[in-house]
Image (cartoon, rainbow, N blue to C red):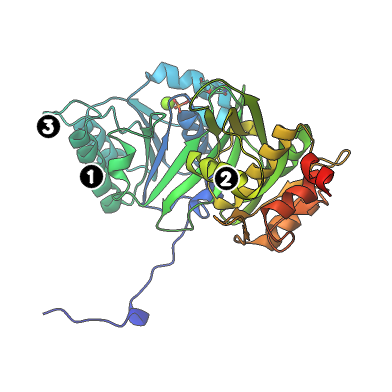
Amino acid sequence: MLKPVPLAQVEAPVVDRLPTGIGELDRVLGGGLVPGSLVLIGGAPGIGKSTLTSSALGNLATAGRKTLYVSGEESAAQVRLRAERLGEAALGVPIVADTDLEAVLATLEAERPEVCVVDSVQVLYDAALSGAPGSVGQVREVAGRLMRVAKERRITVVLVGHVTKEGSLAGPRVLEHLVDCVLSFEGERERTYRTLRSLKNRFGSTNEVGVFEMHDSGLEEVADASARFVAEATRAPGSVVLASMEGSRPLLVELQALVAPTELTPPRRIANGVDRNRLALVLAVLARHGGLSLGSSDVFVSVAGGVRIDEPGADLAVALALASAARGVPLAAGHAPLAAFGELGLTGELRHVAHPERRLAEARKFGLERILHPGGPADLGEALSGALGPRREDAKAA
Ligand code: TYD
Ligand code: MG
């Protein structure tokens, strides 16, 4: 028989942390790596996973931690070449380049590093299993065995996993339930901005986001992302600043829309950085309640800098950008861009979203005085006429 214990009497160990020395990464992790935890970093090839993990290990090694880099994808020489770009710290990390799971496990037992990066989980394989490296069976086995060692020996293991553009893959998805923390590294390869977000975190909050920029000498943290994006905002028709929340952090981003006549049926609806389904919803609400029907136009919406926004609070900004683009009228008054946030309801009403005060404070901090948000205009129609003036036909009728 088991004896139930009141939760208040259960001993809860204080979680100590290993700071990686990369502020944005530590914040997303909830204050650094937790000893003995299993972290998965997923992302498209070329996004910067190896760069980020190499830098983090370098900092940990410099801080006197015992580290190990297991490279299954690249030769030791290739990893060295990258480390040279990242600086002295990264060169201090011991490396083994192998894909045999048994050999890697034996190395972990012998070396007992405090933090180990496995790059990537898809190339390691267990010779006793029949599946090819990267198959669901192999990836599960590899992660499961590594987890056992991690917990037994209190080794923090950071698994790197490739995710294809569609997010499909045998790797990270099948591991999400197994690991303590899932980080997703995103961005467009051609652009320099990268965002790191936490999708699951047993030791911290999810939906924290870190912003980085890829340079010649590695990833640089962008602590002042809002300032960058506001400064880069074009202020042209179709441009608006969205005051979004990324976890606990307000982030101002420029949202751009382009509306162009088309012969295509159905017309194109392209969304970069915002959800396609929310774009469809905003278009429907605009047509029904905003007097703007774009049924014979191609529509492109994009978040500048390659950032992805994943919240309904973007609706109003998307609608404003589309209306501004369609009418060819800028939302910016003089030098100051218009800022907006808020969700659109199906009946055209503006709905409240989380943390309005933080969004407003962030916008004001960067000199944006005109901010449209729920609580101001009653509905979408009012927001549109407030931002762009009355439509020509309405003005004529009046
Ligand atoms: P990488 O970390 O190898 O990506 P991943 O492990 O996710 O596949 O790096 C991706 C790209 O970043 C690569 O094409 C080269 C570029 N890069 C830089 O621009 N600057 C740098 O300092 C480094 C190390 C890489
Ligand atoms: Mg890599």
Separation (CA) of disc 1 from disc 2: 43 Å
Residue 388 x/y as whole percent: 79, 43
SS under mark 1: helix
Q: Quadrant of the N terminus?
A: bottom left
Separation (CA) of disc 3 from disc 1: 13 Å
- Left or right: residue 168 versus residue 250 is left
Q: Residues within 10 Å of mark 3 (few under 14, many from 20)?
A: few
Q: Name the residue carrying label 2.
A: 282
Ligand 1 within 8 angstroms of badge 2 C-beta: no
Q: Name the residue carrying label 3.
A: 129
Separation (CA) of disc 3 from disc 2: 49 Å
Q: Residues within 10 Å of mark 1 (few under 14, many from 20)?
A: some
Q: Give the residue displayed 39% in from the left and 20% down from the top.
A: 76
Residue 274 x/y as whole percent: 55, 40
Q: Which of these two is toward me, 355 or 324? A: 324
Q: Amino acid at mark 1?
A: Gly
Does residue 23 appear in this view? no
Q: In which image quadrant can residue 347 be found?
A: bottom right
- Left or right: residue 63 versus residue 339 is left
